[in-house]
């Protein structure tokens, strides 16, 4: 299976890796970081999932479609959580939510097309 057909999803996953990493790093700088521990954990889990998915898709791996579905689920969860924090004015959460929504859309389309 050619990895070229996954190119949009790969790029979306890589963008999410960057956004989630940045979001988690910025959350760690907040004054009461303990209140954000579950949120930071979600960012880190998403980052790991997105990185793995991008790598498998770039290989044209047989599990690419399944990983796209998993990515879409994680993206939607992360976008929802980041969206809540973005409403409080955190720009890094807004950017993360935006990247996750875009990735969810790309991965959902890829998993349907497969």
Image: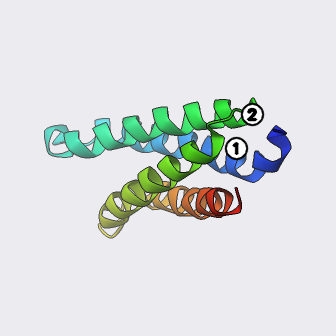
Label 1 secondary element: helix
Q: Which of 74 and 14 is in front in this view?
A: 74
- The residue labelled by disc 2 is 58
**Residue 21 numbered tag:** none
How far apart marks 2 and 1 lie (CA) works out to 7 Å
> Residue 66 appears at what percent x and percent y?
56, 45
Q: Residue at x 14, y 38 (%)?
A: 34
Residue drawn at x 36%, y 64% as measured from the top left: 80
Q: Return the x and y of residue 23 as percentages of the image width and height.
A: 42, 45
Q: Mark 1 points at which residue?
A: 10
Res 57 quadrant in image: top right
Give SS at disc 2.
helix
Q: How crowded is mark 1: few (under 14 residues within 10 Å), some or many (20 or more)?
A: many
Residue 84 drawn at (x, y percent): 30, 66
Of labels 2 and 1, earlier in sequence is: 1
* Residue at the image position 45 percent from the left and 62 percent from the top: 94
Image location (x, y in percent) of residue 28: 30, 35
Q: Does residue 81 show up?
A: yes
Q: Which of 89 and 54 is in front in this view?
A: 54
Q: Are marks 2 and 1 in contact (CB under 8 Å)?
A: yes
């Amino acid at each position: 299976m050619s990895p070229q057909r996954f190119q949009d999803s790969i790029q979306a996953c890589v963008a999410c890796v960057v956004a989630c990493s940045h979001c988690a790093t910025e959350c760690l700088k907040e004054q009461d970081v303990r209140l954000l521990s579950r949120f930071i954990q979600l960012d880190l889990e998403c980052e790991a999932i997105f990185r793995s998915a991008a790598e498998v898709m770039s290989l044209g791996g047989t599990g690419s479609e399944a990983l796209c579905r998993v990515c879409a689920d994680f993206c939607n969860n992360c976008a929802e959580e980041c969206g809540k924090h973005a409403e409080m004015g955190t720009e890094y959460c807004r950017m993360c939510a935006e990247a996750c929504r875009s990735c969810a859309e790309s991965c959902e389309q890829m998993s349907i097309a497969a």
